[in-house]
Amino acid sequence: MHPLHYDTDNSDALADECYAPGEVIIDYTSMFAGEPLTVSNRKWAADAIDTMRVFDAKQHVMTGLVIGQLPQPSATNIPLPDHCTAVANVNGHIQRKAAAAEWSVAGGAGSMAHNGLVRIKGLEEAGQNPWRVRKHKCILTWSDGNPHVMEPMKDAPVVTRE
């Protein structure tokens, strides 16, 4: 997954390079409650980019990527699986300047908040990276800064419904 595509408003690259073709499962219930979405990769990418445009600045950083169920590259006699699980730490830094005024009423300040792969054989046969995200689940582990920055997300179509 390439978080840069979220930050550069590139929905085509997000759909083509990160997510599997067809339906994907998107789960932000730890942040926004509700139910996980089952949605087409193109709709998710377009809606996610549209939703992120309400922010004045955004930066997503992915580190600590751990991919399970894959053989070591030197193990040439072991067949590759059709799917595997990947876990990563993703930090999102979001800024919405209008949130500073909203939060100052509550005694706060600032405009910042922090908060499974499949193998596509056709891409592999074309000599491209064949791994894409089929299920994307966000688990909120910590949050800091102004909680009002994320207010536009609570009613966003990409978060609550297809």
Image (tube, rainbow, N blue to C red):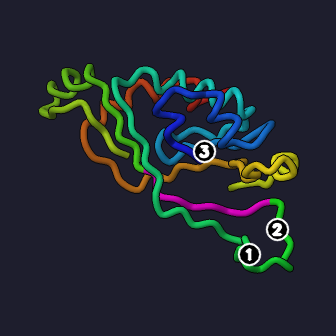
Give, as a three-letter code, the residue at label 1: Pro
Give, as a three-letter code, the residue at label 2: Leu
**Residue at 38% in and 24% down:** 55
Q: CA distance from mark 2 to mark 3?
A: 27 Å
Quarter placement of the C terminus? top right
Front one among 101 and 61: 61
**Residue at 67% in and 37% down:** 37
Relative placement, left or right, of 73 versus 155 is right
Look at mark 2 in the image and give the residue it sits on.
80
Residue 113, image x, y percentages: 31, 39
CB under 8 Å between callouts 1 and 2?
A: yes
Kind of element beneath mark 2 = loop
Q: CA distance from mark 1 to mark 2?
A: 7 Å
**In the rendered image, the vertical position of residue 35 relative to residue 153, given as above or below:** below
Kind of element beneath mark 1 = loop
User: Which residue lies most toward the left here?
Assistant: 107
Look at mark 3 in the image and give the residue it sits on.
27
Look at mark 1 in the image and give the residue it sits on.
71
Residue 85 is covered by the magenta coloring: yes
